[in-house]
Image: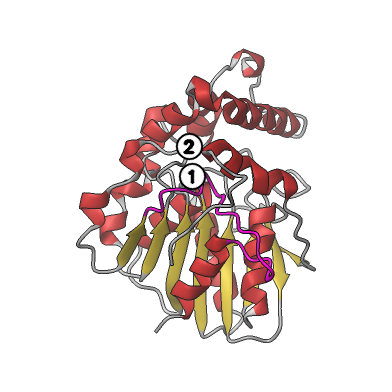
């Protein structure tokens, strides 16, 4: 099932940016708020049709359930008879979360809480889908645990499996448009949290110029890590994938502008009993656009094909 991009999308940046700016998908989510064990909350967006199977979808850095790639995947699974649970990380829905912590690339405790909540709905089959940061989160989660019934399969796209080198890659001059956008969003989020939590020190927030500095000053200490490198080392899915025992498809385009060479561990995964690693030549980062009558992107078709296969 090879991917061929539309002729108009002739470089990785166009492949990455076009779907975000120009694709329109709207699905009729029904929101549910669940409480977490530490007196915080997560906002979940559902599509339900009394299915025995549910797809749990995890978004990327500074994303949410209303991003086009999330709604496109949700619609694709719903049209095939699945229920869908798209979830917002802490601080990523319309309301800031209560606790000092936010979310991060390895916060598998929240994903586990979402999976347990879905399991209580009597689903026979649970499937996981993750994009970018959500892909790293999904792989780390699967690697930390033995096979969990009823989790049957997982599919992830555009995964920064090695966080340290991935952070350096996205901070290169050629990617300045992306890194500055993420930084602006993260700064706004931290300032918003500081208006609710006086114990959050934001005196250095406007001096931070890179994502690594942000992770050093905020992500790492807020979540119990020594510094950014400690956070990257302990949460990179690259160091968890060998332990995965759930059938899983990883798809990362070779021209992904966000991913470093370390995010393509071909030799490590070549003989893996449960992982299938695909590297289309094109696709950008969470792109894989297609112009067709059914409205599906290639990533949505690929995810469905893998999950629906015997």
Cα gap from disc 2 to disc 1, whole angstroms: 15 Å
Q: Which mark is residue 258?
A: 2
Judge by depth and name the residue closer to the eye, 12 or 86.
12
Residue 224 picture location, percent across and down: 46, 36
Horizontally, residue 130 falls left or right of residue 92, namely: left
Outermost top residue: 207
Q: Residue at x 72, y 29 (%)?
A: 188
Figure check: 177 above or below 297: above
Judge by depth and name the residue closer to the eye, 232 or 26.
26
* Residue 115 drawn in magenta: no
According to the picture, the residue beneath numbered tag 1 turns out to be 105
The magenta region covers 279-297
Could you tell which of marks 2 and 1 lies nearer the N-terminus? 1
Q: Residues within 10 Å of mark 1 (few under 14, many from 20)?
A: many
Q: Residue at x 43, y 43 (%)?
A: 160
Residue 305 picture location, percent across and down: 48, 74
Judge by depth and name the residue closer to the eye, 34 or 104.
104
Outermost front residue: 7
- Magenta: main secondary structure equals loop
Dividing the picture into quarters, in which one does residue 180 lie? top right
């Amino acid at each position: 099932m090879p991917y061929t991009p539309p002729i108009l999308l002739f470089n990785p940046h166009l492949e990455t940016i076009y779907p975000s700016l120009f694709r329109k998908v709207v699905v009729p989510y029904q929101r549910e708020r669940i409480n977490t064990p530490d007196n915080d909350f997560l906002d979940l967006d559902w599509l339900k049709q009394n299915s025995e199977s549910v797809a749990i979808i995890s978004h990327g850095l500074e994303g949410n359930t209303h991003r086009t790639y999330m709604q496109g995947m949700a619609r694709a699974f719903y049209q095939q008879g699945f229920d869908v649970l798209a979830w917002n990380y802490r601080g990523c829905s319309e309301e800031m979360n209560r606790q000092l912590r936010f979310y991060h690339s390895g916060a598998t405790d929240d994903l586990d809480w979402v999976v347990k909540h879905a399991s209580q709905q009597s689903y026979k089959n649970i499937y996981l889908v993750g994009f970018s940061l959500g892909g790293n989160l999904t792989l780390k989660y699967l690697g930390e645990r033995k096979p969990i019934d009823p989790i049957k399969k997982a599919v992830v796209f555009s995964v920064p499996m090695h966080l340290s080198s991935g952070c350096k890659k996205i901070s290169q001059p050629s990617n300045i448009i992306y890194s500055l956008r993420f930084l602006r969003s993260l700064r706004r989020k931290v300032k918003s949290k500081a208006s609710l939590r006086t114990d959050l020190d934001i005196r250095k927030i406007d001096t931070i110029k890179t994502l690594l500095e942000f992770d050093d000053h905020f992500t790492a200490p807020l979540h119990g890590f020594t510094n950014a490198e400690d956070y990257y080392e302990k949460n990179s899915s690259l160091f968890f994938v060998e332990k995965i025992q759930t059938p899983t498809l990883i798809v990362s385009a070779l021209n992904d502008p966000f991913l470093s060479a370390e995010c393509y561990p071909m030799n490590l995964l070549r003989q893996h009993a449960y992982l299938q690693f695909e590297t289309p030549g094109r696709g950008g980062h969470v792109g894989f656009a297609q112009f067709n009558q059914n409205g599906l992107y290639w990533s949505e078709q690929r995810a469905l094909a893998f999950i629906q296969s015997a």
